[in-house]
Structures are given as C-alpha cells and as structure tokens.
Image (tube, coloured by chain):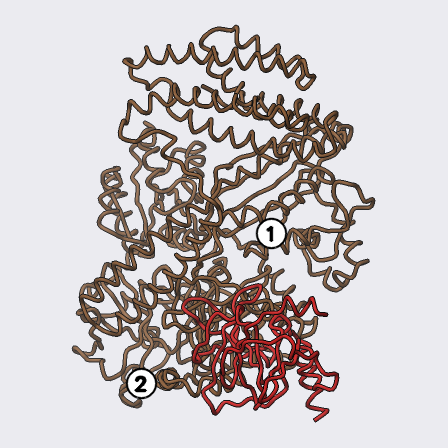
Chain colours: A brown, B red
Amino acid sequence: MEIGPLVEELENISKTGAVSSANEASENAPEDSSNLEDLISMHRSETKEMNTPQPGVAPPEIEAPMEVEQVTESGVSHAALESLKEQVADGLIDASVLDEFKEELSAGPSLTAPVTEKAQKIEPQNIKEEVVQSKVEENKPAIVPEKIEEKVKVPVEQPSASKAPSSGSIADSTVRVQVSTLEKIMNIVGELVLNRNQVIQTASQLNDPEMNRLSNQLNTITSELQSEVMITRMQPIGNILTKFERLVRDLSKQNDKRIKLDLSGQDTDLDRTLIEAIKDPLVHIIRNCCDHGIENIEERKNTDKPEVGTISVKAYNESGQVTIEVSDDGRGLNKERIVSKALEKNVITPGQLETMDDQSIYSLVLAPGFSTAEKVTNISGRGVGMDVVKSNIEKIGGSVALTSVPGVGSCFKLRIPLTLAIIPALIVRSKGEFFAIPQLNLVELVRLEGEDRGKLIENIQSREFLRLRGSLTPLFRINSSLELEEVNKKSKAVNSLLPDCESANNLTNRLGSIEDSENIVILSADDHVYALVVDEILDTQEIVVKPLSSVLKDIVMFGGATIMGDGRVALILDASGFLRKSLNLTNSSLENTFNIASSKASVETPKDTLEFLLFSLRDKQKYAIPLALVTRLEEFPISSIERTGNQHIVRYLDKPLPLIDVEKTLTLSNCDTLADYLGSRPEETKIHCIVTSYRNKNFALVVEKILDIFSEEAKVEADAVDRSGIEGTIFINEKIVNVLDLISIVKLQKIGAFRDGVEGNEETNFQKSVLLVDDSSFYRRVEAEALKELGIEVTTAVDGSDALNKLSENQSFDVIITDIEMPVLDGWGLVEQLKEVQALKEIPIIALTTKYSIADRERSETLGIEYHLEKFNKSEVKDVLKIIFNNKGK
Amino acid sequence: MENEKDHLSLQFCGFKIGGDEFGIPVELVQEVIKPLPVTTVPLSQNTIRGLINLRGQIVTCISLRNLFGLEEDLSANHMNIIVRGDEGLFAFVVDEVTDIVELDKNNLELTPETLKQSLKSYVDYIYKKEDGLQILLNTKKIIKAKANAKEITQLSEKQS
C-alpha cells in the first residue's frame, strides 16, 4: 500500500472539512481544526505502524483469512459511507469527497484497504465537527472509528503475527503513559546517575576488587537505563513539522502566493521538552519565509522562477545534535535594508560595518530589537523580531545560523541538543570551587607554561587577550570574573565547622602550586570564541542539570547546578551568559575585538593547507616540519641519554631511540649541541624531542623548543636553500620559517641502515614524462621539483578524477605517480579505473603514502601497483624510476 | 481581619535568631537538618549562603541572620530548616530550633509599625506567649527577597 499519495489526499479532505467547519461552526473553529490536524497526524502515524509489514511478504497460507477480512473491511467501508452520507446531508462535508469515496469503494476489492483507511481518517474529523455542532451526537460517531480501527488493525496485523507469533499484538506493544510519570522516571534516573557517580568514586577509593566489580556493573546498568529512559522522552519532530503544512497553506492563500512545503526527516527524534521549545521559533521562521522570503507570483514569473515557491524543512541528526534547516527559494535577505536599519537602530556602528562580510550582515537580523518589515502585517513583523527565535533557541542550548543569497533564497539552520537533562561537561576547579562547563561550548584546552604566559597573553588597557594561533582571543580569568577569592573565603568560613571540609582543603594543598602555568579553556558561545583561565582542569563527566532557584537566576553566568561524584554541588557555567556578563562589565571595544576576531575566523580556510609543527633551534630561527610526519612530542631528562659510539640514544618504548642533533646535522653551529647540553646542564633538565618515524624506525629530533602548530597554504620556496636538510622556506605571520627535509636529515646521520646513503653523483637525465597526482600542493610542488631535477617532464593532477581527465587528453605518460589519500577519487580508486582501460593498463604506477603500512602495501599489490613507497623519500622514488625506465629501455 | 486569622496555620515551628524567637508555619517545613557542605554561588547577594545537596536535590540556602541585617555568626553549629517553596526547597539557616508552638488566635498581634525595617517586610504577626514574643514570618516573602534585600541591609546598616 502506498501511503504517500493517500496521505496527501486525506490532507485535502481534512482541509476542505476544516474550512467548511471554520466557515459555519463557530469562532473556535480554527483552534478545533488545528486539534483536528493533531488527530489526523496521530492517526497517520498509527496507520504507518500498521502498514509496516510489506504486502508481498505475507505467507501464502494466510491468504484465506485475509480475504475474509477484506470482506469485513468493505462492509465497514460501506458503513463509513453511510455515515459520510449523513454528514453530507448535514452539510458538513463537501459532496465531492463523498463522490470520491464512492468511486474508490466501487473500484474493486483491491482498493478496499486504502479506502477503509480513508474512512478511518475521515471519521475522527467528523467527530470533531459533530462535537462542534452538538454535544448530543457525541456518542454515535465516537464508536464508529473505534470499530473501524479495530477491524483495520486485524487484517494488516495478521501477516506480522504469523511471521513472528511470539512478538504479541500491537495492542500489547504500546502503552499510553502520562508524561508526568515519564518526567518522574527521568528525575529518578537522574538521581540514580548521581548516586552511581558517588558509588564509583567511593569504590575507587576503597580499592576492593569485589566492590569495583559491583560498581562497574552498576555503572553499565545505569548507563543503559539512562539511555533507554532518554528514548522514552524522545518524540519524532514530525509531530510539529506536519502542522506547518497547514500554516503554509493558509499563509499562501492570504498572501496570494503559491508556496509548497517540503518536509524531510520527520522521524528525527528529539526530547519532548525541546520539541515544545522549538515550535514557536519554527513557526516564526516559517511565517517569515512565507511573508518576506517567497515573492508573489508576478515577481517570481519575472525572475524566471517556478510560480510555486518552496519552503523546505529538513531535520537530521548531526554529531550528537539535531539540525533543522528551514530554507526558502525566495528573494533572499535585503542587505541594504538590513544595513540601513541596523545603523538606524544603533545595532552596529559604521565602523563595525566595515569589517563585516555579507553573512554577518545577514546575521544582524537575529540581533535584538531588529525588524526590517516596512509595514506590519498580521503574519510576521509584529514588533517581535527574529531575535526572539535566536534567544529561544539559545535558551535550550541550541544555535541559529543564517545564510542568504540574494535572489536565490535564504536558509536558517537551527542546531539543537538532543536532550537537556543529562549532558557531558568538563569539570574545572578554581580557588577550590568546582565548575562544570558543558562540552557543547568547549573548543579546546590550552596550557601555557613558563615564559609563554607572558608572550602569548597580551594586555590592552587591562583587558587580556590570548594569541591563539595568530588570532587574538579575548581572555577572562574565572577567578576575577567571579570574584572567587571572596567566594572561597566565604565558603571556607561557612563550611569551617563541617568535619569533611578539612579533607577538601588538604586536597587543594596536595595538588600543589599551579603558579607556573596557565590552564586555559577555549569556549565558544553566541558565535564568539573566548578564553577562560582556570586554576585546574579536572576531567569530563556526565552531569545532571538541575535548575537554579529564581533568586539565583539573575546571575546569568550559571546555567544550573549539578551534584558531583563526591556529593558536593558544582555550578554549571553558562558560556554565553558568562560572555554577556563579561561584556557588560567591559566596554564595547571588546565587541569590536570580537568582530575582528570573528571576521578573521570566518575567512574560509584555504582548501589546500598543510599543518606544520613549529619549533625553534638555538640559532633563534624558526623551523617547521609537516605535522603528518610527527609521531609524538616527547621530553627526555638528560640523565636518561646514553651513547653508543658517537650516537646519543634514549630508551623509548623498550627500543633504542637515536637522537638526531638537528643543529649539528644542518651545521648551524660548530659545536656538538647535545654534548653541550649534556655537559652544561643539570641532570634533571629535559630536552624537547620530536619523535618521527622513517622506514618504521623512530628517530628523535632534538630541538630547543616546540612552539606551535599552524596550518598554512603551503608555498615552500626552495630558492634560498644553501644546504641539504632544509626543504625550503615559508612565510608565517611575515616571518621566515625553515621547513626541514626530514628524510635527508635522517639520511645525513651515519646510523645503521642509512649509513649506505651514498647518493649517486651521475648525471641523470631521463627524457620521460610523468603524471603526478597529489591533493596537497606542497607535496605536489616538492615532488615535481625533485622529478624535474631528473629531467622528467611533470604533469600534475589534484586528485584521481582530475588525473583521469588529464589522461583522457594525453595518454603518453611513462609513469604515473599517485598519492593514496586523496579527496574525490583516491589513489586506489584511480588505479582500479586505470587498469580497466586498455591503453592505460600498462603504464607503471608508483603509489606514495605518508602512512606506510604493510596492509596498504598489500592492497596496492593486489591492485597491480608495483611500487608502494613512502612520501618524502626522493631517492627511493628516483631509484624506482631508474628501474622502470631502464627496464623499458631494454 | 478575623478571616485572615482563620486561615492562619495553628502550628508553628519555632526557632531563634540573635536572641529573638521566630516561627514559620509547620506545614511548610519539610525537615530540620544539621549543616551540610555549602557551595557558595559567586556574585550572589549576600543573603544567599549557597547551595546544598539534600539527598540529590539542590537546595538554596538562605541566611536569615543576613536577611534581617544581623552580623553573620559562623562560630556556632547552626541548624537548617528545609522549607518548601513554590519552586523547590529552600534551607533557612537559623541559630537554634526550639519547638512546635500551638497557637491561640486571640494572642496574635499585627506587625508593630516601629519594627526594624529590615525585619518588618517579612513579618506577618507577632504572637504573644506567656514568657515572651514570637515573630511569625512569611516564608514566601523571605524566598522572594531578591536584590532589595541587599539595599535593606545596607539601609539598616546606615541606620544603626
């Protein structure tokens, strides 16, 4: 049975029915008709459920009962028809509906089922209308749908029952439960979660294996229970989305526009309370789309758009959140009008305007006190702007983003958390007070040690800023923002008489001083990113959010409170509230900084970027190596360094790890840096090492200091390089950074397997052409340069599909060198396609990869790739090329 | 006025703060507990002592001493009276809990005009006992005592 068209039809019917009732019944009619839609959507979901067994799968032996049921069904349909006739007589239903109904009824037995459904759908509506008309009639129609429902259920359910007899009937599988009961269960589970946390903490202190086992068990069971209970609170978002169909229909009629509503993802589940909370904002957005977004028919015709405008509402799950997209294909937002209005209403200053791009201008629509509607209509623009949408969504921990393209349409993107009751949070401590920061707001954690504190934290007129990878981020200190010094005094005084307060104080002492470093939590809220300095970062926990009493709600910095594992109460930091409060305290210049920061941040990250690890050597120059080549960063105390011959090694993962003295290798200084280190510094001094691996062996580069990670569109200039070991230079923040050629550095060492490295001096000049496929422009460039040195003509392609294009133009390549990991079409995909083409089949292929593994190599071999090599290994590629070309030559 | 007195509860839970005896309707009292660890709420008004964890429920703790403009006394082990409010539980920190008092309506007196300003706004009636007076408090007003509490305290400080 196909539900789709049927449902549409039913909607039409319900519409006509509803309209007629609205016309004649009473003033309450619109309300009633919306209830009516509730009813219909409810019934629809039921019908869906009933229809799940596919008609085709029913085993043959139940055909007979099916037929019997069908007879009953048609009987029912006739009954329904009779009642319909009555309704028509009463003038409640359009006669055309009845005709339609009759037609379908007479169409034959095959149609009876859908028809019955139709009857069933119509019935509830009839009830509603009769209730409006007169309450005396209530009894009669109330019985009818029940009867039908039962009878419809039976035949449809039959196949499923015969398939799985033990599963029980549908009547048994659903139970109606009071929402309040569910809420109560939720609360109790919340308590249980807290209790579990406490038990786990106590158990870990007791160190009793049996206790640990039991607490682990409790942990699993509670988690399971928690997730199941969460599911009971979930409702498909379709419950509210389907209501918008009517809204859009009505609005399009009123406005003389033609609008179609496209819904998708109605079965996306969302917490019940959240569904309630997003309903009004969504109505507001859709009203706006209908009123301002979609043009009228004339205008649409003039701009070559289809007469019927489309509003589409898409709901889907994305990374633990539900995203709802409302987009229209209307005229888009009017930038000029927004700008003039924003300036007029002092939402922004002309200075701010200059730094804003189009999208942030559009986002001004969401700013408080903003309405561009020139005339107030009864649909939207009732003085309440879109800011209500924003604040309502943010209240429930969600976010709103707005994009718009003039003439093409606009799109609202709402991100909503799945649930509010239990959230993961980061626990931090400052001055002995615990705070929970919702993970949702968390961007990253930064720790500054030693002199970095002074270097990376800047001060402008007593406002602090953190240099976070080149961008200035406003920095707040939780201790001063929340006056924690005093808080701590107060709580110490208040709790001084309690026995267990001692232990808490001891704990603080035991953890020692934290003076020499800054723990920074980077948070994002309201599209702003800011840094917050805390004393200690503890761990992450699932916390149960408990509301604060209204007396404390004035302090907007806290979103609630929770109970920690040890039973103490911790406040939940509301990242956006904290920001707002902090902004109030400071002046508007901070807002400017944010604008600058955010405009910088919103610049699209270049597609082809490469991440580098930045470090310094003792010559005070900055050096970098591609992050992809770095295995780990380690610190080794000088005392752990041993020697074999002249080679310094440390024990690392039970293997000797050769230390490579980069300065010596690059002959930057004449002295032996490592020896210098070893001689002059106290034993416990630590040296910083970058552990990297080459041919499955680990090496550690000794550097003075590891600075940062940055991503840069890689343009490595190799012109100024005077020695081997340096790949080239790049500019970062207007400073030159040397990029090391890791492989030649390793080769320059006289260690083990690489001692042989006598590079051939012979003049190599293959007059061949090679197709080089790599997505990273940096690698592409480096490899191409290396190949050109060999007298090879290089053609480059950015990914597999590009390579195929290039091959279709020119098939005369001698060798194809391809990266494995690429977007669109990866190396393997490319080779698979190549091997299918007769002309290209024979071209030798060299595969390059940064992540060399035996498994990958085997995969390459099965695909017919002869050479599977590690990237950044020029000599190996050269050797292989030599072999290929020599073989060919012969 | 007589009608209002009719609605008044007949049993009051008595407690002492700074030598005076107070009372709140007994049906609003859930329990009386010894002090629990308090989490101080940063930036809160000084009458709010903090939050306590009462068997999994978070209870806002109000110091009546502070509310009435008296010096906070942290030397003694005070008692907390857990009171049911419209939106959850509140803990009133008091010096000492005395007894349940059975009221005789004839001995009720309206709040005297001359009562200290900081106290007057929370008082419903004064009850004349044989051996002294008991001040009957309105818990709703105490719970709702928001920012103005601070002003009142400051005002009373100025006065005194």
> Could you say which disc has been placed on residue A400 in the image?
1
Where is residue A751? Give x, y as percent.
20, 69
Give the quadrant of residue A528. bottom right
Closer to the camera, A488 or A725?
A488
Closer to the camera, A441 or A53?
A53
Left or right of A424, for residue A41: right
Residue tagged 2: A685
Question: Mark 2 is on which residue type?
Answer: Thr
Q: Residues within 10 Å of mark 1 (few under 14, many from 20)?
A: many
Q: Residues within 10 Å of mark 2 (few under 14, many from 20)?
A: some
Picture residue at 28% right of the left edge, 59% below the top:
A218
Give the quadrant of residue A805. top left
**Reading the chain from its start, which is encountered first: label 1 or label 2?**
1
Picture residue at 72% right of the left edge, 83% below the top:
B112
Decide: is A636 above or below A872.
below
- Dot 1 lies on which element? strand
Left or right of A92, for residue A746: left
Question: Mark 1 is on which residue type?
Answer: Val
